[in-house]
């Protein structure tokens, strides 16, 4: 059910709920602090960043990280400063969820700054990978050239995989030749992502490369994945039909039937 936001804000002011929860946040007890932070987070624009400032450097990791993620969503001139320094120690999935919530909220107000700024200075590969996925979510296509550059420099398969996935999500076709050249040098997990991304990007070069791979591949699981991407790219079904006519084994025949059944 929708509510009148003006009336809602007036009720909050009348009851002075922001002040109430700000005062409760002064408690040193972890449970009390976490509850107060959750409530202040729900109050959103009715709370100023200064309200939680004393918790931003708490010795309690959970409280500190929660406060940082909330700070990003509050009224402040430096909302994104805690994206520096890998956000915090022991970056985890809960941190991802909380930061994402804050970024979505800020993006509704105005365009986000390019997250590539923080990708470039991150040292934690999990945090770096997360930010790269957020670049895909917020469609920050202007970061694509820098992502390709980072792909060529990083030794982290986690980061490489996120970059390749994001390139696909951003439909950055300029990266096709780089992915094709690097394929043989990439580890198995990255090769799998490259195959899927080339299927997303499409084009004659991607189709030709995936077709060549198909004829060279003996791994059955990979054969199916290659066929799926070839089917996706080859809308005229010319190449796909040619491959189908050369299929001899029972497995290949079943693979073609499976793909066609699931693409209908």
Image (spheres, grey):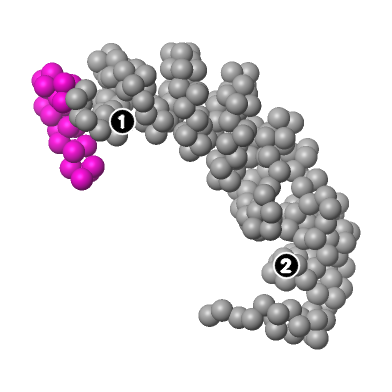
Answer with left or right where residue 76 lies relative to residue 253: right
Answer with left or right where residue 57 lies relative to residue 185: right
Q: Quadrant of the C terminus?
A: top left
Number of residues whose C-alpha sits closer than 10 Å to that of mark 2, classed few (under 14), some (14–19) or many (20 or more)? some
Number of residues whose C-alpha sits closer than 10 Å to that of mark 1, classed few (under 14), some (14–19) or many (20 or more)? many
Q: Quadrant of residue 234?
A: top left
Give the prevailing secondary structure in the magenta stretch.
Answer: helix
Tag nearer the camera, 1 or 2: 1
Q: Can you say whether 28 is above or below 134 in the image?
A: below
Give the label on residue 142, or none. none
**Residue 29 visible in the current orientation:** no
Element class at badge 2: helix
Residue 14: x and y in percent read 80, 86
- Disc 1 to disc 2, how far (Cα)? 45 Å
Q: Is residue 204 magenta?
A: no
Residue 60: x and y in percent read 80, 54
Q: Residue at x 74, y 85 (%)?
A: 11
Q: Which region of the structure is painted magenta?
A: 241-264
Answer with left or right where residue 77 lies relative to residue 162: right
Residue 77: x and y in percent read 84, 53
Front-lying residue, 204 or 27: 204
Q: Which residue is mark 1?
A: 233
Q: Quadrant of residue 217?
A: top left
Q: Residue at x 21, y 23 (%)?
A: 239
Residue 229: x and y in percent read 31, 31
Q: Quadrant of residue 86?
A: top right
Q: Which residue is mark 2?
A: 44
**Residue 198 visible in the current orientation:** yes
Q: Residue at x 15, y 36 (%)?
A: 257
Q: Is residue 253 magenta?
A: yes
């Amino acid at each position: 059910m929708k509510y009148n936001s003006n009336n809602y804000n007036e009720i909050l002011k009348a009851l002075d709920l922001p002040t109430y929860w700000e005062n409760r946040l002064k408690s040193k007890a972890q449970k009390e602090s976490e509850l107060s932070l959750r409530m202040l987070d729900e109050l959103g624009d009715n709370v100023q960043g200064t309200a939680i400032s004393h918790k931003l450097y708490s010795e309690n990791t959970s409280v500190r990280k929660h406060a940082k993620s909330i700070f990003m969503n509050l009224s402040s001139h430096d909302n994104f400063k805690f994206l520096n320094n890998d956000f915090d120690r022991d970056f985890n999935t809960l941190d991802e969820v909380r930061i994402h919530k804050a970024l979505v909220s800020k993006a509704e107000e105005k365009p986000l700054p390019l997250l590539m700024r923080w990708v470039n200075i991150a040292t934690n590969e999990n945090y770096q990978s997360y930010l790269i996925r957020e670049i895909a979510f917020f469609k920050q296509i202007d970061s694509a050239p820098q992502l390709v550059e980072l792909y060529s420099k990083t030794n982290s398969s986690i980061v490489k995989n996120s970059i390749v996935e994001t390139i696909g999500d951003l439909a950055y076709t300029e990266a096709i030749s780089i992915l094709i050249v690097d394929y043989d040098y990439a580890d198995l997990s990255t090769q799998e992502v490259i195959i899927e991304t080339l299927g997303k990007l499409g084009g004659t070069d991607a189709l030709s490369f995936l077709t060549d791979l198909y004829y060279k591949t003996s791994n059955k699981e990979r054969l199916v994945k290659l066929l799926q991407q070839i089917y996706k790219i080859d809308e005229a079904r010319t190449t796909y039909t040619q491959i189908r006519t050369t299929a001899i084994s029972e497995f290949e025949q079943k693979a073609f039937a499976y793909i066609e059944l699931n693409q209908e």
